[in-house]
Image (cartoon, rainbow, N blue to C red):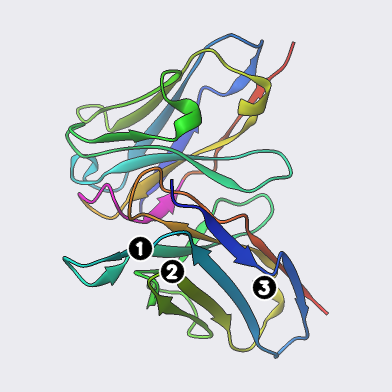
């Protein structure tokens, strides 16, 4: 069974940093692209970032470029999102999601339950 | 960036009736190399992660009931629920995965009339 479990969320002050993790199991992690997607309170879904199987291709949403860094450790079956310079508008539930095989430019078929990040003083 | 719009913002449909949601992209998401539209539909229920319904604009994900169907090409797309069930109450999002950033539409809330 495919499982994605996010962790690392919490309360952080504006300007602070957090590192989210996503532990993957039930599939061959190094053969799937991965993504982070967030849902802000009362608002819709927002794509954050995607990474290819060997980290060759990495993409970010414009508002996260330079502040967020996606990475993966295929040996540990884990995906990460380092978030720096956090702003109030980054408050959201962050979801880890699996892509369609090696395709970075593809949909996500499995999602974790999400981890809540709250940016507030 | 490709801007995704959806209409309506919300709709209320009687049980067993048809629900139609429209999605438009600011530029074509049809990839000539594979002749596929890089457009996906997700269902989002409160307190749950998104669920993949339709990809390549019209391919139903395994296990998704056949009352859900997707159509369209280029810049105009439609998600149809042919016979609304109570469990279909949710917000539905389209997303393009043609060019990063892979933008979502604003969502359409579907309720029971």
Q: Residues within 10 Å of mark 3 (few under 14, many from 20)?
A: few
Q: Chain of mark 1?
A: B
**Residue at point 41%, 18% (across, down):** A66
Q: Residue B34 appears at what percent x and percent y?
A: 18, 68
The answer to whether residue A66 is left or right of residue A44 is left
The answer to whether residue B106 is left or right of residue B78 is right
**Residue at point 43%, 63% (across, down):** B40
Q: Main secondary structure of the magenta part?
A: loop
Circles 1 and 2: CB atoms closer than 8 Å: yes
Q: Quadrant of residue A60?
A: top left
Instruction: Give the camera-side residue of B63 and A54.
Output: A54
Q: Chain of mark 3?
A: B
Q: In the rendered image, which residue does mark 1 sit on?
A: B29
Residue B75, which numbered label?
A: 2
Q: Residue A76 appears at what percent x and percent y?
A: 26, 27
Q: Are marks 2 and 3 on the same chain?
A: yes
Q: Quadrant of residue A81?
A: top left
The quarter in which the C terminus of chain A is drawn is top right
Instruction: Give the camera-side residue of A106 and B52.
Output: A106
Numbered disc 2: secondary structure: loop
Q: Residues within 10 Å of mark 1 (few under 14, many from 20)?
A: many
Q: Is residue A110 magenta?
A: yes
Q: Is residue A23 above or below residue B27?
A: above
The answer to whether residue B97 is left or right of residue B26 is left
Q: In the rendered image, which residue does mark 3 sit on?
A: B87
Q: Which mark is in front, 3 or 1?
A: 1
User: Which range of residues does the magenta coloring cover?
Assistant: A102-111
Numbered disc 1: secondary structure: loop
Q: Is residue A121 above or below residue B31?
A: above
């Amino acid at each position: 069974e495919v499982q994605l479990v996010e962790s690392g969320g919490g309360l952080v002050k504006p300007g602070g940093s957090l590192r989210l993790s996503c532990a993957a199991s039930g599939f061959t992690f190094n053969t799937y692209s991965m993504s982070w997607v967030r849902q802000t309170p009362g608002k819709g879904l927002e794509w954050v970032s995607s990474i290819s199987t060997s980290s060759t291709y990495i993409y970010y949403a414009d508002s996260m470029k330079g502040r967020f860094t996606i990475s993966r450790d295929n040996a540990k079956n884990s995906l990460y999102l380092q978030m720096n310079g956090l702003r109030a508008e980054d408050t959201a539930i962050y979801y880890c999601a699996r892509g369609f095989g090696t395709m970075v430019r593809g949909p996500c078929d499995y999602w974790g339950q999400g981890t809540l990040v709250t940016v507030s003083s | 960036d490709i801007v995704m719009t959806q209409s309506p913002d919300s709709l209320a449909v009687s049980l067993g009736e048809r629900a139609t949601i429209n999605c438009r992209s600011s530029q074509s998401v049809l990839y000539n190399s594979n002749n596929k539209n890089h457009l996906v539909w997700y269902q989002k229920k409160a307190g749950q992660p998104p669920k993949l319904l339709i990809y390549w604009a019209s391919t139903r994900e395994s296990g998704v009931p056949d009352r859900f169907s997707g159509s369209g090409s280029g810049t105009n797309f439609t998600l149809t629920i042919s016979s609304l069930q109570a469990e279909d109450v949710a917000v539905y999002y389209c997303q393009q995965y043609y060019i990063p950033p892979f933008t979502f539409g604003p969502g359409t809330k579907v309720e029971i009339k």
